[in-house]
Image: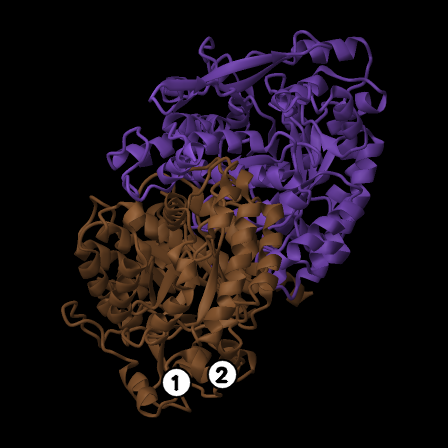
Chain colours: A brown, B purple
Amino acid sequence: MIKNDHKAYAKREKFYMHGTMYPDVRVGMVKVNLTPTVTRDDRGMPHTRSNAPVLIYDTSGAYSDPDFTPDFEKGLPPMRQRWIADRARNRQGVTQMECAKAGIITPEMEYVAIRESMNSESLGIKNHITPEFVRNEVALGRAVIPANTHHPESEPMTIGRHFAVKINTNIGNSATTSSIDEEVDKALWSCRWGGDTLMDLSTGSNIHETRERILRNCPVPVGTVPIYQALEKVKGRVEDLTWEVFRDTLVEQCEQGVDYFTIHAGIRRQNVHLADNRLCGIVSRGGSIMSKWCLIHDRESFLYEHFDDICDIVYRYDTALSLGDGLRPGCIADANDAAQFAELDTMGELVLRAWEKNVQAFIEGPGHVPLHMIRENMERQLVKCHEAPFYTLGPIVTDIAPGYDHITSAIGATHIAWLGTAMLCYVTPKEHLALPNKDDVRAGIIAYKIAAHAADIAKGHPAATIRDNALSKARFEFRWRDQFHLSLDPELALRYFTEVGHTDGDYCTMCGPDFCAARLSHDLRKLKKRQ
Amino acid sequence: MIKNDHKAYAKREKFYMHGTMYPDVRVGMVKVNLTPTVTRDDRGMPHTRSNAPVLIYDTSGAYSDPDFTPDFEKGLPPMRQRWIADRARNRQGVTQMECAKAGIITPEMEYVAIRESMNSESLGIKNHITPEFVRNEVALGRAVIPANTHHPESEPMTIGRHFAVKINTNIGNSATTSSIDEEVDKALWSCRWGGDTLMDLSTGSNIHETRERILRNCPVPVGTVPIYQALEKVKGRVEDLTWEVFRDTLVEQCEQGVDYFTIHAGIRRQNVHLADNRLCGIVSRGGSIMSKWCLIHDRESFLYEHFDDICDIVYRYDTALSLGDGLRPGCIADANDAAQFAELDTMGELVLRAWEKNVQAFIEGPGHVPLHMIRENMERQLVKCHEAPFYTLGPIVTDIAPGYDHITSAIGATHIAWLGTAMLCYVTPKEHLALPNKDDVRAGIIAYKIAAHAADIAKGHPAATIRDNALSKARFEFRWRDQFHLSLDPELALRYFTEVGHTDGDYCTMCGPDFCAARLSHDLRKLKKRQ
């Protein structure tokens, strides 16, 4: 489906950069070739200056390579298979963290370093992010490379606050909706628009088969919330959930290749009551399931009690743990309360236990938080969770705009990512109202690509503004097509531009020629030259 | 057109609050009546508790009053006519600022105080904003009440950082597009969705007639950029612009009732060169026109030289001045540069001169600014411009998303409004690409209502969270219709909810009954009660 869209990107091309430590590391990216700047001198003679191409981080995998023919039955080529086999043979360690602590730079780490250094050469710096830098961040737990050894099809990426901010998208069917093919289609649609990781939150029928099909065809890491499938196994009866059912579900999903699990082990029996007086109670599905379980059985949750066992299982596959925030606020009135922060403390304790077992881990965060209360979330998380990467859902900064929560949440997301959040879970316009369709997924992703990129700029990521500046230059020089090719959604920009009858030229019908500021501004420069 | 939509708001009703100082002050608002909360005890018996109605600031004027029948030929009733006549007869002063400095509370000030105190009674505070507080802010120049004495149809509102953040929308035809009726239709559409003021940026034919029709039918203050019409009068030849042509245009528009003028008097001949090395030059239309004029004639701009004359003209009508930022950055690379800040210094000088003549004034701001550079804009503006209200265009925080600039700019707008910006000029999805249609206007307004409201919350506006909390409570209690009536765009929320077959009930098909966190959370509370 992605393949057929190539014509929309006539001047975009798939481009590969190769590893030097590992020659079979081959990092796919998008190269935007720009047209030259043409100026005319006093005699009307044209002078051209070329514009350097711009590289764009690409999450669409092999699908955007014109030489690749997708076969959804067969799945993507298992790019990482040999690296995984080599590590096993050489007993270098199972997880990325284990290797990192042992001083080993894995091919995944070199891959990530190249991917994150994109465009740095145009700044006169060669690879501003080195493989050694990546290794060190992973060793310290400050960055995670979600890469299940049973998901060799995924392209390595990292989640950490010293790297570009990433975005996650959620897909998944519920009890009555959508087929396997639809879910796979949505997964690839997400990768096409820029989703860095993908969570399959299916709770309906065919959970196992849907996930299998997604994993085999998905070029980005895939996460799940295993408690959902465990609950299906006990026919939706929370009280019947057991450690054994959950453990078997973990193993089943690890074997399939799930790259990270959201586990709500931060919920303690003693803390559930802290949510009693909330306006919106507990709004995390996993959080409400585990809280109910604790109350029914009046005991500590099996996720907390068996946390070391969970780590032992996921270690064998290098499935990362995303410590779920089951007590996150579900409205701004409940933000930063005792329940939320008690859970954060527990997550800080758990992340150390994960690291002891060389399990990669990160921390999920809110949710709904007014703008002025966001900073406390980030600062507290860094301290309490020992700089483990933070992965937040928005946050939404006002509750009055259902239907527009991709916007209410992108505002909070940009702010918290600027302050250090490593990955943002997208929110679509349908949040709180319905499951997203493909248009909603696209709208949610673009809003979050904006948030992540704006945060990269604010954080001072060295190469972040290159694309902005190339686009602005193209805009000022009326290189309309270049502008669109550099934009997050070239199709939409082109459509808006052409559907009102605009054509390429040194003004547009928005302001007309007399009122075109850019055109007047060029006149001004000519005037000055003559003076 | 607005009238026919009443059925969409069955539980919303038009509501008036009356003045005590001036009994004919009658402030329209929207009252959302909510259904009661129903809980069931152990024996299944229902218990109901009522939910207090929520008031919403209403910009739609008489059009949302079911007792009003619009007549676009005749125009709106001239609500303020007697107040204006009384002031003239009693020689109290012409402008709101003049009255304020003299210690006089005008009916407009009481109107504003009631409007801004909405919902404060439910907090146990009666009118947390008093008419005297409004008067004092206007006297100090910290708040503006744009209210041309020739536009008695407009409902008083204020722009100032100690009040709710406001939003402005831009409409207007260009050389070849749209008719008068279309522009009036767009103006009322803007008021219907929540635009607090409206700028008519028409540059095409029928400028005068379009403006007349808008003013007579528009319940919110209307602003213009008079240099556009002046340029039309000299057939688009910048070099032919003169003070006399401009002066006559000011008088013409003052007579019609324009409530505020954007005047690019901050551009000094000596500062134009500061934009020479910019990536995007000068992107303000007015700014590029005046810069070109300065260079062609090699002299100071007539706007700067005749600034006192401008003040003398607008004083007579109480037209406020919006000092235009002709040198605002047009891309993030040009943000916070010498050109921008030199102009800001000049605007600070001019605003004092306006105040001396009892002319109300505010300051326009950027534009395109990365998130981490926004604070400097606000802090500098407060100091250099003596706390005159700041009115910014976004700012856009990244340039890579044409087609989504309502989002890139809402992110920056929320941030700068939190820090003290009093009014935000909306940006539509079509910015940089085409003129907005009605869908775009609606999308831009909602994005900016979100930004303004999120900033009110972050600033700690006493009554700001009342609507959020009422909506969140309705959401948690599955009072779906109440939730939608409280939302910024009830129609869209309802459409998203119902188009996938949802019906009112204590879960929805998003998660299904087993995975509904809110439902589980209610179970939890019942469990606890029994323990």
Residue B160 located left or right of residue A56? right
| Relative to B291, B268 lies left or right | right
B398 up-or-down from B318: above or below: below
Q: What mark, if any, has residue A101 been given in the picture?
A: 2
Q: Is residue B196 visible?
A: no
**Residue B376 sits in quarter:** bottom right
The residue lying at 47 percent from left, 83 percent from top is A100
Q: At 48% across and 61% down in the image, what residue appears?
A: A363
Secondary structure beneath dot 1 equals loop
The foreground one among A506 and B223 is B223
Q: Position of residue A134 (x, y in %)?
A: 49, 79
The three-letter amino acid code for the residue at tag 1 is: Gly
Q: Earlier in the sequence, mark 2 or mark 1?
A: 1
Amino acid at pointer 2? Lys
In what quadrant of the picture does the C terminus of chain A appear? bottom right
Is residue A484 rendered to the left or right of residue A181?
A: right
Of the pair A79 and B40, the residue shown nearer to us? B40
Circle 1 residue: A93
Which sits in the foreground, B518 or B78? B518
Is A22 in front, or is A456?
Answer: A22
